[in-house]
């Protein structure tokens, strides 16, 4: 018996979410819940502010938000570039794109949402000043192809903002280090490019962009209530059980310990999100 919120069906594994084809209602609801949670995360807020400043996002700039999800950053970027600028938000998942369009319309945002893929952007060569690509590369089989595509659409002097997780940095408080490692190792096997955070500098250089020496970082935190009420650990636990790295008794004990820690208010897990800036050379 696995502790935690009873689920009417198993939560989608990491490979099942944030795919262009992920359209089932429970999966869409799970993705939106995660993105809304991340939007509220104060550490993410600080990383976004660092990136906005580093890329010099301001009035009149042409911006593309690649893999724009629910469109929160697309709306924010649109307000920063103002009426003389333009934001194109590229999102291949029709459910997320539709929700982002609804939210933007409600907010009166001029951001324009279009279909497209990170490695095949519907934009001309050298046509944008800023590429914003947040937590998308980890979902791609070939992140290098995407960063090359960013370089293609950037105008000389333009800046690519690449923010992404390195899932091999996750800590899970309230379970033993060995159980935490087993849970996370199982999760890593389910993510398409789980360690992409640490590879971004290489991707940037190989795409012919100039890497900014300043590196940004945030920790994406799952607070107690989220760990107790959302199925993250159950999901990781199910994967660890399936590959034999944890027994049912070990998983049961870990989830029980997490539930107690969450009820006492001190449970958390955190994963590092790195931020890098790559500029297209002027010449
Ligand atoms: C974790 S979400 C991040 C959304 C948003 N950038 C944010 O940070 O809130 C990943 C996004 O990448 C999109 N995505 C997945 N595969 C993609 C691809 N090949 N090209 C572009 N976007 C993709 C997903 O649909 C999803 O919106």
Image (tube, rainbow, N blue to C red):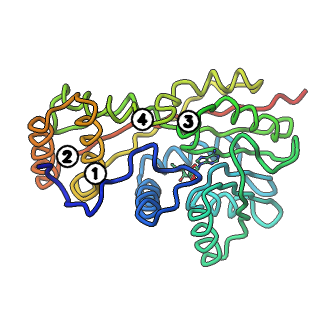
In this figure, which residue is indicated by the disc labeled 1? 223
Q: Position of residue 275 (x, y in %)?
A: 55, 35
- Are discs 1 and 2 less than 8 Å apart at CB? yes
Q: Is residue 105 above or below residue 166?
A: below
Question: Quick one: label 4 or label 2, which is nearer the N terminus?
Answer: 2
Q: Position of residue 179 (x, y in %)?
A: 19, 30
In this figure, which residue is indicated by the disc labeled 2? 267
Disc 4/disc 3 C-alpha distance (Å)? 10 Å
Judge from the rendering whether residue 107 lies leftward or rightward of residue 229; answer left or right.
right
CA neighbours of label 2 inside 10 A, class few (<14), some (14 to 19), many (20+): many
- Are discs 4 and 2 less than 8 Å apart at CB? no
Question: Quick one: label 1 or label 4, which is nearer the N terminus?
Answer: 1
Instruction: Check disc 2 and report its element: helix, strand or loop.
Output: loop
In this figure, which residue is indicated by the disc labeled 4? 272
Displayed quadrant of residue 70: bottom right
**Which residue is found at the position 77% from the left and 24% from the top?**
208
Q: Position of residue 2 (x, y in %)?
A: 15, 49
Exactly how many numbered labels are in the figure?
4
Question: Quick one: label 3 or label 1, which is nearer the N terminus?
Answer: 1
CA neighbours of label 1 inside 10 A, class few (<14), some (14 to 19), many (20+): some
In this figure, which residue is indicated by the disc labeled 3? 275
Displayed quadrant of residue 107: bottom right
* In-front residue for pair 15/67: 15
- Are discs 1 and 4 less than 8 Å apart at CB? no
């Amino acid at each position: 018996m696995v502790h935690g919120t009873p689920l009417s069906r198993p939560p989608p594994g990491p490979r099942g979410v944030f795919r262009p084809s992920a359209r089932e209602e429970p999966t869409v609801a799970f993705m939106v819940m995660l993105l809304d949670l991340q939007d509220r995360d104060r550490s993410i807020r600080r990383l976004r502010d660092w990136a906005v400043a580093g890329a010099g996002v301001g009035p009149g700039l042409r911006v593309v938000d690649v893999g724009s999800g629910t469109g929160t950053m697309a709306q924010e970027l649109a307000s920063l570039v103002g009426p003389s600028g333009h934001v194109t938000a590229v999102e291949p998942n029709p459910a997320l794109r539709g929700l982002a369009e609804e939210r933007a319309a409600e907010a009166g945002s001029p951001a324009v949402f279009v279909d497209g893929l990170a490695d095949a952007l519907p934009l001309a060569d050298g046509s944008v000043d800023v590429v914003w690509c947040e937590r998308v590369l980890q979902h791609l089989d070939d992140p290098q192809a995407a960063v090359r595509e960013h370089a293609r659409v950037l105008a000389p002097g333009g800046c690519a903002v690449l923010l992404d997780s390195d899932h091999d940095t996750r800590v899970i408080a309230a379970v033993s280090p060995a159980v935490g490692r087993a849970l996370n190792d199982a999760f890593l096997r389910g993510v398409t490019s789980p360690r992409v955070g640490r590879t971004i500098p290489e991707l940037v250089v190989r795409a012919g962009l100039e890497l900014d020496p300043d590196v940004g970082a945030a920790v994406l935190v799952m607070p107690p209530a989220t760990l107790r009420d959302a199925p993250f650990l159950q999901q990781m636990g199910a994967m660890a059980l399936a590959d034999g790295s944890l027994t049912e008794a070990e998983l049961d004990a870990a989830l029980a310990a997490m539930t107690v820690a969450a009820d006492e208010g001190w449970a958390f897990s955190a994963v590092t999100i790195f931020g890098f800036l790559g500029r297209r050379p002027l010449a």
